[in-house]
Image (cartoon, helix red, strand yellow):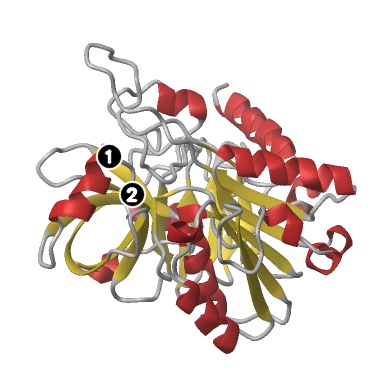
Amino acid sequence: MSHQVALSFEDGVTRFIKCNPMETVADAAYRARINIPFDCRDGACGTCKAYCERGDFDGGDYIEDALTEDEAENGYCLPCQMTPESDLVLQIATTSDVAKTAAGSHTGTITEIRRHSGTAVGFTMEVDNRDELVFLPGQYVNITVPGIGATRSYSFSSGPSIRQVSFLVRITEGGLMSEYLRDRAQKGDRLEFTGPMGSFFLREQSRPALLLAGGTGLAPLLSILEKMRESPAEHPVHMIYGVSTDDDLVELEALDRYAAELPGFTYSYCVSDEASSAPDKGYVMSLMAPEHLNGGDVDVYLCGPPGMVEAVRQHLNAEGITPANFYFEKFNLAAAPTEGVRDVPPEPESEVTGESVAEAAGRAAEPAPYDIIVNHAQHAKDTMRAAIRKEGSR
């Protein structure tokens, strides 16, 4: 039986390959013309060392100089030796450029536009060669603004197995994609995009989960909920959705549907505007009850603006709670470009990217800088990945 392997590179690009029975991940990658760095292919050098985020595999034969027992117990592996026993997600300790690959390019047709309010719009696309578009729930793509050529980054709000893909976009005055979607977009319009990208995605469920969404940060969590609905786990899932005004409050019908169809799923929402008609006013932290945090034995998924992310982190610290895993993605709204100034990020509307702040800030033609952190073990992983790169350069 063949298995799907997601290769997540350091620059945010994710490539999917199919691994045949008894085929190593490295062999499958090279068959797909993706060059995972290695020096030996014999499990002796450790150059191809990777981290397995999800899935089961046979680690194969290797020497301890290439992969220690502790590393193997902590999820590290050697793609040149490992054979999948299920679908896998691997963190590859190099960039897609070094691996001589790139994010996939796709084209699709708009089939539906949902102008929810003056602050949010959703749209759905039928993608050409849909079977070639594979993504993890929570990831994003870079969409080219028609007639302009600039790209903007948006998370899928639909699940990976849904044939037509959907997105949820915040409307920002002066935004290139915002104004296109608000004023000119029509059914039948053609859009181009590249991806998938990003390290914010659903991991295997082994404990309760708390999903926190701020504004259109709801989009990737809708994709995650769809995947959970298709493959439910025996653990409760609670979502808290926070927005600024009643106009920002969208997709409650979808959340009602998941509450009815996904066992163990509940949700609540709040609006920070005191004039709101919502039953709960305030911020997401006010709705975080002890049962949602499960004494720290919980996976937290958070997508929202930086202020929200930092507020949640401070709240958890104040409560003395360290989640088992804390996955978050935060997005900034940058100022509109100023004529004659080159290094100002061009638009305030982009939702998410997987780049680091430094990488994004260094590219004036791209969206505003964003950053993504995976979990409390990430610093240890980063240290290990740095060691892997150092060893591989010898």
Res. 150 image quadrant: top left
Give the class, few, some or many, for how many residues have Cα within 10 Å of label 2's Cα (few <14, many ≥20).
many
Task: Give the amino acid at mark 1.
Answer: Gly
The residue at which mark 1 appears reads as 175
Task: Give the amino acid at mark 2.
Answer: Ile
Q: Nearer the viewer, residue 73 or 39?
A: 73
Residue 107 place in picture, x, y as percent: 18, 58
Position of 73 relative to 95 (above/below): below
Res. 112 image quadrant: bottom left
Q: Residue at x 53, y 39 (%)?
A: 40
**Screen quadrant of the C terminus:** top right
Position of 178 relative to 371 (above/below): below
Q: Residue at x 73, y 62 (%)?
A: 287
Q: Residue at x 84, y 43 (%)?
A: 317
The residue at which mark 2 appears reads as 171
Question: As drawn, which residue projects farthest toward the top?
Answer: 340
Residues under numbered marks 1 and 2 in contact, where contact means CB atoms less than 8 Å apart? yes
Position of 236 relative to 190 (above/below): below
Residues at marks 1 and 2, CA–CA distance in whole angstroms: 7 Å
Residue 30 place in picture, x, y as percent: 37, 50
Mark 2 residue element: loop
Q: Nearer the viewer, residue 9 or 190?
A: 190
Residue 387 place in picture, x, y as percent: 66, 29
Mark 1 residue element: loop
Q: How many numbered marks are there?
A: 2
Q: Can residue 204 be seen in this view?
A: no
Residue 285 place in picture, x, y as percent: 73, 53
Left or right, 149 with respect to 253, comes to left
Which labelled disc corresponds to residue 150? none
